[in-house]
Image (cartoon, rainbow, N blue to C red):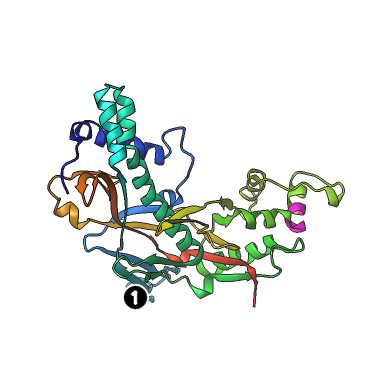
Amino acid sequence: MEQSLFIKWIDKYFKGIIVKRLETLNGKNNDQALTYMFREMLRKQFSVTGKWEAINILNTRVSADIVSMDSSLPLKMRDSIRKASGDIPKSGMELWLNETQLTELDTMIATKIDESVLVARLFQDISRVITGIYEMTENLFLQGLSTGIISVEDEKNTGSLIRLDFGYLDANKFGVSVLWDNVAAKPLDDIGVVLKKAKHSDGNTISHIYMNDATFDNFVKTEQVKGYFAFSIGFFGDKTIVPVPTLEKINSVLKTDNKYRVEIHIVDRTVIVEKKGKRTTVTPWSDGKVILTTSKEVGVLNYARLAEQNHPVSGVSYQTADDYILVSMYRKNDPSLAEFTTSQARVIPVICNVEQIYSLDTKTLQA
């Protein structure tokens, strides 16, 4: 690895372009097209040891006893603590400008083209390598939240997977009375069963419900939900023309109804993954799964320092994005001349406090 041929512009613009790209990804610019739920629902947490950890406390609220003066206090059972951990895997992405593209850049410099055009071409891959880490993290997070399990490819063993199981409680997993793709299903009753268990057995108050768009479509098309919505707006006409509520409208009812007090969130997300030059579109959310939580924060984004941050390579230009993404630019002649832009990260989304997370499988009948 050697210093970039364009170090003059790297020294001048590299850091600023990183900041601008992060502002776009984090929704500060109007051109933001994608959303990242992991940023809304996970708290960043640095790991000194390079391990990810999920500490779940089965926190049961127990009433204190009224005792006589000078009497001893009754002992209460201490809440149980379960801990899962493992190594934070490394991920990365590499893009390059080939000899033809470098010749084009040389020509742009020689003809004194507007510097903004040159900079846009030179740094075009920064956006992609940062976004690539974000997309990977979002893919893993949605997979983990909807199933309680994440599968990560092991960089040290091609074709092998690292499996993270966050230990969703069997007691918090539910089926339904009638599959939701049937208009005769009773989704409000199914949700009510979960709410009741959470509140009366566990002392938890559910406030957020997550499902994909297909599951939500099934939900609002059922006779029960349409009837519930029609009643709430005072519609008593022909049942065959009861309007199908939108997300905004059904939430306006559910959030104010003392029986529910919940908000539904639709997860409509695909991620493009590339392996050996082949791109595939994947849908990380498990179809038919409904996840109910007591809070929007469901875990942490565990990250660790990379070896290259502690031992930088001579000639390589570095910038750090969002605390955990190391972006590098350098030149290499192996076997032909190329300018590389890479990203590396040791980061993993971790679901914690699973005793406050409930799963409803709309494709499985309750036993």
> Residue 7's image quarter?
top left
Element carrying mark 1: loop
* Nearer the observer, 8 or 339: 339
Q: Residue at x 71, y 47 (%)?
A: 245
**Main SS class of the magenta portion in the image:** helix
Q: Which amino acid, by three-letter code, is at mark 1?
A: Ser
Left or right of 181 in this view: 349: left
Query: As drawn, which residue projects farthest toward the left?
Result: 314
Q: Nearer the viewer, residue 274 or 355?
A: 274
Query: Which residue is at the front of the view, 301 or 102?
Result: 102
Residue 53 horizontal/vertical position (percent): 32, 65
Return the x and y of residue 329 as percentages of the image width and height: 23, 43
Q: What residue lies at 48% left-to-right and 43% top-to-bottom? A: 34
Quadrant of res 177 = bottom right
Q: Which residues are magenta?
A: 222-227
Location of residue 140 in the rendering, given as x and y in whole percent from the top left corner: 43, 59
Residue 18 visible in the snapshot: no
Q: Is residue 9 magenta?
A: no
Q: Is residue 87 above or below residue 254?
A: below
Residue underneath mark 1: 71
Q: Look at 34% across and 42% down and name the residue there.
A: 125
Quadrant assignment, res 166? bottom left
